[in-house]
Amino acid sequence: VVMILEKENAVLGNRELMGATNPNDAEEGTIRKQFALSIEANSVHGSDSAETAIEEINYFFDESEIL
């Protein structure tokens, strides 16, 4: 599932929800702690910066698909 999240500090907030890339380092209750098998199979991806988010949004979505 690919989605665009829009809110103040969306990248930081989403990264906190996802947890550390290494599931062994992720905090309890995060997506990666609960579902990831390894760093390579970490169950979720999120942009690491606003600049990267723009690149990834443009890769996955046509401008007409963004509300």
Image (tube, rainbow, N blue to C red):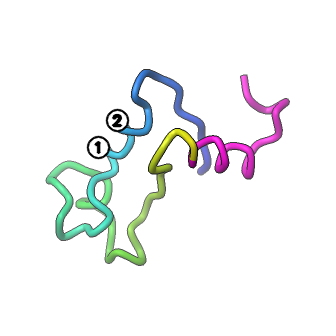
Instruction: Identify the amino acid type marked 2.
Output: Gly
Bounds of the magenta segment: 52-67
* Of residues 26 and 50, the one drawn nearer to the viewer in this rendering: 50
* Of residues 41 and 21, the one drawn nearer to the viewer in this rendering: 21
Task: Please state if 33 lies on the left or on the right of 9 as rendered.
Answer: left
**Residue denoted by label 2:** 13
Q: Position of residue 14 (x, y in %)?
A: 39, 40
Q: Residue at x 44, y 58 (%)?
A: 44
Q: Is residue 38 above or below residue 51?
A: below
Q: Is residue 19 above or below residue 37?
A: above
Tag 2 secondary structure: helix
Instruction: Identify the amino acid type marked 1.
Output: Glu
In the rendered image, residue 65 lying in the magenta stretch gets the answer: yes
**Residue denoted by label 1:** 16
Which mark, by number, is residue 4? none
In three-dimensional space, the C-alpha distance between marks 1 and 2, rounded to whole angstroms, equals: 5 Å
Q: Position of residue 60 (x, y in %)?
A: 73, 50
Q: Position of residue 48 (x, y in %)?
A: 45, 50
Q: Is residue 65 above or below residue 42?
A: above
Task: Please state if 10 lies on the left or on the right of 23 as rendered.
Answer: right
Task: Please state if 42 lies on the left or on the right of 30 as rendered.
Answer: right
Q: Residue at x 79, y 32 (%)?
A: 65
Occupied quadrant, residue 23: bottom left
In the rendered image, residue 40 lying in the magenta stretch gets the answer: no
Q: Residue at x 74, y 45 (%)?
A: 58
Q: Residues within 10 Å of mark 2 (few under 14, many from 20)?
A: few
**Contact, CB < 8 Å: mark 1 with mark 2?**
yes
Q: Is residue 40 above or below residue 12?
A: below
